[in-house]
Image (tube, rainbow, N blue to C red):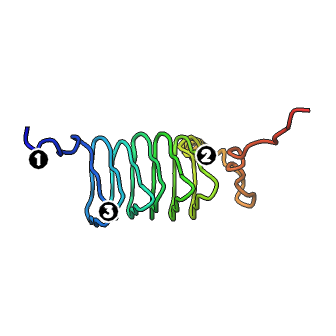
Amino acid sequence: MSAAIDTMPEANKLYIGKGVTIKAAVLVSNTVVIAGYLEGDVSVENLIVSETGTIRGRISVARNAEIAGKVFERLDVKGLLILRSSSRVDGNISFGTLTMEQGASVTGEVSSAHSRADQRSSTSDRNQSARFGNSAPANQPDLSALELMPGPVTAPV
């Protein structure tokens, strides 16, 4: 075989090397690995951002993401999101499951996909009640968001 064929990247995988800058929308059906800089919206199954990698845009990950570098704007991960100790995320994050190492930095709103689903159903229930005249009087605060807060935690004795 020729040397060019031996060095061909895997199908459905995008690798942005250190020192490479790309400004574009990216849609990859499998994996994006970023060691350089990517600016643009991303839709992918799996995402890896290395310590030298930076991504800026609205990012939608269908499965899992591992972040060791920097992410700016919006990060939506349906499955497992791993934030390594070297990671810095400035923007809103949503996730199915979160693992965060000590030293990781997050600035922005953080929510689990489960709590967002609960909020949507709670909002839908409130809207349904309002349509049928079951809403709280206007002078009383809406306390429905408190349903999402966890109850007291007790330690075993």
Residue in the foreground of this view, choosing between 63 and 123 = 63
Q: Position of residue 71 (x, y in %)?
A: 45, 61
Q: Amino acid at mark 2?
A: Arg
Judge depth for marks 1 and 2 and give the one in front: 1
Q: Amino acid at mark 3?
A: Gly
Q: Are marks 1 and 3 in contact (CB under 8 Å)?
A: no
Q: Compute the Cα span from label 3 to label 2.
A: 36 Å
Query: In the figure, 93 relative to 117: above or below?
Result: below
Q: Which residue is mark 1?
A: 4
Query: In the figure, 65 relative to 39: above or below?
Result: above
Rendering quarter of residue 152: top right
Q: Are marks 3 and 2 in contact (CB under 8 Å)?
A: no
Q: Position of residue 137 (x, y in %)?
A: 72, 54
**Lateral position of residue 36 relative to residue 141, left or right:** left
Q: Earlier in the sequence, mark 1 or mark 3?
A: 1
Q: Position of residue 85 (x, y in %)?
A: 57, 56
Secondary structure, mark 1, is: helix
Q: Earlier in the sequence, mark 1 or mark 2?
A: 1
Within 10 Å of disc 3 (Cα), the crowding (few <14, some 14-19, many 20+) is: some
Secondary structure, mark 3, is: loop
Q: Which residue is mark 3?
A: 40
What residue is at 57 percent from the left and 64 percent from the top? 107
Rendering quarter of residue 26: bottom left
Q: Amino acid at mark 1?
A: Ala
**The furthest residue to the left:** 2
The numbered dot on residue 126 is 2
Residue in the foreground of this view, choosing between 100 and 18 = 18
Q: Earlier in the sequence, mark 3 or mark 2?
A: 3
